[in-house]
Every structure is written in structure tokens, then in C-alpha cells.
Amino acid sequence: MKTEAEQPAYAAGSLPQLDEKDLAILRLLQEDAKITVREIATRVHLSTTPVHERIKRMEEEGVIRQYVALVDHTKVGKGLMVICYVSLKEHSKQAGARFIRAVRGLDEVVECYNISGEFDFMLKVVAANMDAYYDFHVNKLSQTENMGHLQSVFVMGIIKQTHRLVF
Amino acid sequence: MKTEAEQPAYAAGSLPQLDEKDLAILRLLQEDAKITVREIATRVHLSTTPVHERIKRMEEEGVIRQYVALVDHTKVGKGLMVICYVSLKEHSKQAGARFIRAVRGLDEVVECYNISGEFDFMLKVVAANMDAYYDFHVNKLSQTENMGHLQSVFVMGIIKQTHRLVF
DNA sequence: ACTGAAAGACACAGACT
DNA sequence: AGTCTGTGTCTTTCAGT
């Protein structure tokens, strides 16, 4: 299973062959990682061994990236979520790579995407409160070399937040 | 543990009292949901019983929202990620509520936030390819009543994607 | 609140179809 | 590629401190 750091920019790997049973197993696991292999076996009409083997195979293929506990950010004192847009001054490969390295090292940044449009990157940032975000913005993100424009959009409400892909 | 549907707009609940041991347990679980209670116990210098009780308590308090397997979207044929901005025509409470209900019912929408700025909502959409996204855009999202402006920003690369909150 | 032990359930591997 | 069976390890509970 790949660790976070090894994650490629956009996983372009070959599509593994997944049959309907594999997909059914994935659907169950992405809803509840604690479901037992027995329970899965019953639901997909198989016994434990093939289910176990299929899961192991999908872990190795990277179809299953990780098993995680999702923590409510508001309940661990991280009440603020901000979407942050960044454009770089210089767009050379090296300059981009340096920015990427910097962003990966910032704990406040939970997501970062290369996007189309007037900005180069979109970041999702989680912070304790406005003071903490201001500190991040001024002292960390703005200080990144090659930083061009920076724009913050504040998340005022979470309407939907899921990791369940429907396939 | 709260289900997705019950999730409030912005969890404004009281902050549960979490001590350093609780946080240490959370840090371990959000990296690996499959870690054994024994292993946690060893790492936080406790025995299995209190660790077990603390985890159960944090599940009940909603600190731990869910245990999930993270699936690589590119490997289940969902290669395209799009950030979608929406502004509504009418901003009454009812009109907003109807939009929210519609968005929660769209499987392609994995995240939706109420945001500050010129648009009302930001959506993260996952689709198989450009054709599938076009279909979603034209036949599903645009058809939502009260839809004002719609703007799509395409994700060209994933630089960082984590669920690990640093606390 | 915690420790230690102990029961029952589970993951995982092996022999077999 | 699958079922069945067994072993060691895990979760989970309970009596005791």
C-alpha cells in the first residue's frame, strides 16, 4: 500500500481488472473499514478465503489506498476550513517542484490540487481559528518562495463530505 | 457515530474534553484504522481496557466520525476530478435547502461547502471522464431548480491529499 | 481510572475440491 | 477459483485494585 509521500501527482497507473465481486467488497469497505471479512463474505455470497485474497490483492494494487479513522475537525479544535488559491510568479518545473515540496510540508494544508484557470493551485486548509489561519497565511504560505497571488475563500458550512465513490 | 445524512451543516457541538492520551490514540487511528488496540496501548503506555473505552467514548461523541477504506478513484474508473462553483438565483432559506437536498443526492458530488465570495457553493465532483462530467453538468447539476451561475475548474494534478489533522 | 486475565470472535493459512 | 477446517491473535468483558 502506498504511503502519502509516495503518492504520484495523478495516479496514471494501469487500471486493475476489478470484477463485480471486487467492487462490491470495495463498496462495503469504503463505508466501514471495520466490517469483518465474514460479514463481507456473507453479503457478496462468497466464503472468507476468496474475500481475504481479493482484499489483499486490492491493497497491493493500490486500489485500497489506506484504512483511516475520520476525525471530526471541529471536535479537535480545528474549527476553520479555508480554500486557498495560489498562483506562482515563475512557472518553471523547478519552481513548481519547490512549491509542491513546501506545501506537502505544511500540516495545515490537507489537500492541494493543480488546477485549470487563472490560479495554479487550490489548497484546502484546516486551522484552529482565524488567528491561526492568519498566522499560516502571512507567516507560512506567503513566505513560500516564488509565491504570486494568494486568495482565500472561507468555508462557512459543510453541506456534504463523503469519501464514498459510487461505482 | 453519526451517519453522513445526519451530519450538521457545520458541527457546532460542544468540544469534548480530550486529554493527551485521547489525542495520541486519535493520531494513531487516523493514520491506520487497522492498528490493534494492543499496539495502541503499548504506544500510549496504557493497557487495552482504557484504550478500548476511550475509543468507544470518542466514537459515541462523534470525535471519530467513521472508519473507512480510502479507494483510489483513478483505479475504479473515476479519473476526473472537478471543482464546481455554484451561485443560486434566489437566496431564501427554502431555496437553499432545496439545493442542498439535491446536491446530497448526487453521487458524483463528494464534497459541498457553503463559501464566502461571489459564489454560494463549492462542489468537488468525481466522474469517470469528460463525457460523464458533461452529462452530470448539463443533465443533473444545471437542471437543479434555482440554479444561477455555474463554473467548473478542472483538477489537473493531485499534489497532496490527506485526512490527517495535526493536533 | 486503571491492570490483568479470560472468553469468544476473528483473521489468516493450509489441505482439499 | 472456490469451500472447509484449524490455529494463533485479536477484541471485548469482567473481577479486582
Image: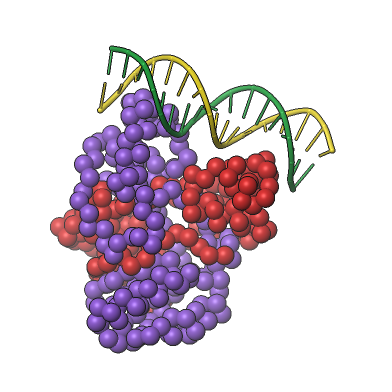
Chain colours: A purple, B red, C green, D yellow
Q: Which residue is the extreme one toward the left?
A: B131
Q: Residue at x 26, y 54 (%)?
A: B74
Q: Can I make out residue B98 in this image?
A: no
How many numbered marks, from 0 up?
0
Q: Position of residue B1 (x, y in %)?
A: 54, 46
Q: Can I make out residue B160 in this image?
A: yes
Q: Residue at x 27, y 86 (%)?
A: A90
Horizontally, is B90 left or right of B25 in the view? left
Q: Residue at x 40, y 70 (%)?
A: A104
Image quarter in which the C terminus of chain A is found: top left
Along the line of sight, which residue is nearer the eye, C9 or A100? A100
Q: Position of residue A109 (x, y in %)?
A: 44, 70
Along the line of sight, which residue is nearer the eye, B100 or B48? B48
Horizontally, is B106 left or right of A32 in the view? left
Q: Position of residue C16 (x, y in %)?
A: 32, 13
Name which quarter of the figure residue A52 lies in: top left
Q: Residue at x 53, y 51 (%)?
A: B29
Horizontally, is C9 left or right of A20 in the view? right
Along the line of sight, which residue is nearer the eye, A89 or B101? A89
Name which quarter of the figure residue B94 lies in: bottom left
Instruction: Judge whether D5 appears above or below C11 on screen.
Output: above
Instruction: Judge whether B107 appears above or below A44 on screen.
Output: below
Q: Position of residue B53 (x, y in %)?
A: 65, 43
Name which quarter of the figure residue A116 lies in: bottom left
